[in-house]
Amino acid sequence: MPRVATFRQDQSMTSRNYLSLFAMPKPVRITGRSSSITNSFVNGLIPVVPPTEDEVREALEILGMQDAIVCAYCGDTSTEWDHLRPLVDKQRPTGYISEIHNLVPACGKCNQSKGNKNWLTWMRSTARLSPAARGVSDIEERIARLQEYEQRGRPTRIDFETVVGADLWDRHWAHHKRLLELMREADADAQEIKIRVRAAYEAQRTGVS
């Protein structure tokens, strides 16, 4: 009996697909960080204006959150404050900034799902993790509160390019373009380095000098 058990165990081990147990780290490309660079060039321009205590109190009162702070979109526990109006669209500033009039308590699910979408359209949509998709029952009541919030403290919108002037604005985006060009050049060199290192690895593994 013990010999049969050993045979079955050995058979199981040899038939197992060990590659299914392995996860290779994903290759990294320098150009794969281009979107992060672009986000930095956009978000790096946007002022952050801390609110006063009275402004926070008034915001919570309008949103009906005097007793408990919850997500303004769905009512779940709030984990952050989300920009009601997006700061970025098509890789350029929209003109809105980080200020109390453009921020509302939110949960991670809603913040992730909403992204740069129009908040009103998104709330009623079937987008993944949106309030409507998750079956939130009081959506219209929440929409009414958010509309009142916008009306009573309308978010400030600024034409960045007009304010700073064409010369400075164009120079900023010229830096962005040049940096992306340098990343592409660096990526080409990195790929050549990778090929040579891989060849050296193969040579060492096979004992070829």
Image (tube, rainbow, N blue to C red):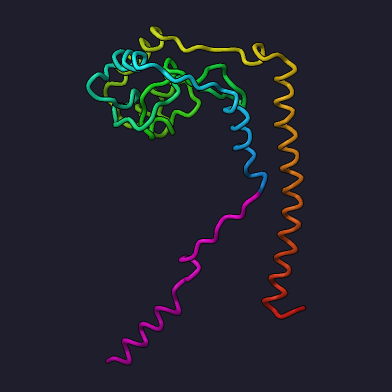
Magenta stretch contains residue 6: yes
Which portion, as a residue range, is magenta? 1-29
**Residue that sits furthest to the top in the current view:** 152
Q: Position of residue 62 (x, y in %)?
A: 31, 13
Quadrant in which residue 135 is drawn: top left
Is residue 29 in view from this perspective?
Answer: yes
Identify which residue, 167 or 206, lies in the foreground. Answer: 167
Front in this rendered view, residue 191 or 37? 37
Any magenta on residue 15?
Answer: yes
- Image vertical order of residue 169 relative to residue 34, above or below: above
Q: Is residue 27 left or right of residue 18?
A: right
Q: How many marks?
A: 0
Report the magenta stretch's main SS: helix
Residue at the (40%, 26%) spot, across then down: 81
Which residue reaches farthest front?
Answer: 52
Determine the residue positioned at 29% across, 30% down.
76
> How far across and down, in percent of the image, does residue 113 sit?
43, 32
Judge whether 156 appears above or below 188 on screen.
above
Residue 120 vs residue 89, the one in the foreground:
89
- Which quadrant is the N terminus positioned in? bottom left
Quarter of the image with the C terminus in it: bottom right
Q: Residue furthest left?
A: 67
Examine the rendering and report whether any part of residue 140 can be seen. no
Q: Residue at x 50, y 61 (%)?
A: 23
Task: Residue 110 in the image: state x and y as whole percent.
Answer: 39, 30
**Residue drawn at x 44%, y 9% as measured from the top left:** 154
- Decide: is 144 above or below 131: above
Query: Is residue 25 rendered to the left or right of residue 84?
Result: right
Splitting the image into 4 quarters, where does residue 172 fall? top right
Residue 96 x/y as whole percent: 53, 17
